[in-house]
Amino acid sequence: MRKNNLKIKDKEIQYFLRRSSRAKNIRLTVNQKGQLIATLPWIARKKTLENFIFKKSSWIFKKINEVKNMKPGLLDRGDRKDYFKNKQRAYDLVKEKLEKYNRFYNFSYRKIYIRNQKTRWGSCSSMGNLNFNWRIVLLDEVYADYLIVHELCHLKQLNHSKKFWALVQRTIPRYKILRKEMKDI
């Protein structure tokens, strides 16, 4: 990635340019450090990107401010060393709770993975693999339960439809409150 600067009105936007052979469109993202990352298809010109950044400058400044003013949450805690230290503990916790809740649901899953992610608590693949963030061990039990049931229910409904939420509600009746609170953790 290459660092670039672009002057817009009285402000300067610093961005990192990433060219991609797979990208079909220009993509702008603001990472957790408040840095603008611009992904540009190989065939696109840099001038096209700069015009795009100019048009999106209000959004860019807003996003950068949001990220810089965010208070650190649990997903920001720990590093690789903490991951390796807590990976087995997280696996044991997840396995135990999956067994508990799956007595009710009786869904089949393939593998459990513990990951070191900065933006996700968990995910479920279409192959039936369940992924969880190692930081689940830092959560209060009620949130860990919600998270595990959430991913477990994705085995049946790989979406967030009404049917999916009805499945979650069967064992986590307060899921709406917990879901909202999880966004602030």
Image (tube, helix red, strand yellow):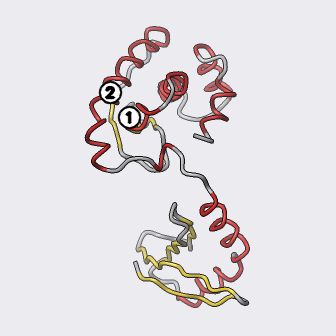
Q: Secondary structure under badge 1?
A: loop
Q: Residue at x 68, y 88 (%)?
A: 8
Q: Which residue is mark 1?
A: 127
Q: Are marks 2 and 1 in contact (CB under 8 Å)?
A: yes
Q: Name the side, left or right, on which 11 lies relative to 18.
A: right
Q: Quadrant for residue 22, please give it.
A: bottom left
* Residue 163, above or below 34: above
User: Could you tell me which quadrant the C terminus lies in?
Assistant: top right
User: Could you tell me which quadrant the N terminus lies in?
Assistant: bottom left
Q: Name the side, left or right, on which 84 lies relative to 139.
A: left
Question: Whole-percent x and y of residue 50?
Answer: 60, 86
Residue furthest to the top: 103
- Residue situated in front as seen by the camera: 109 or 136: 136
Q: Residue at x 39, y 36 (%)?
A: 131
Q: Residue at x 49, y 26 (%)?
A: 144
**Residue 110, labelled with which disc?**
2
Q: Name the side, left or right, on which 59 lies relative to 107.
A: right
Q: Of callouts 2 and 1, which one flags the residue occurring earlier in the amino acid sequence? A: 2
Q: Residue at x 48, y 46 (%)?
A: 75
Q: Mark 2, mark 1: which one is toward the viewer? A: 2
Question: Whole-percent x and y of residue 67?
Answer: 60, 61
Q: Secondary structure under badge 2?
A: loop
* Residue 143, above or below 123: above
Question: Whole-percent x and y of residue 31?
Answer: 52, 63
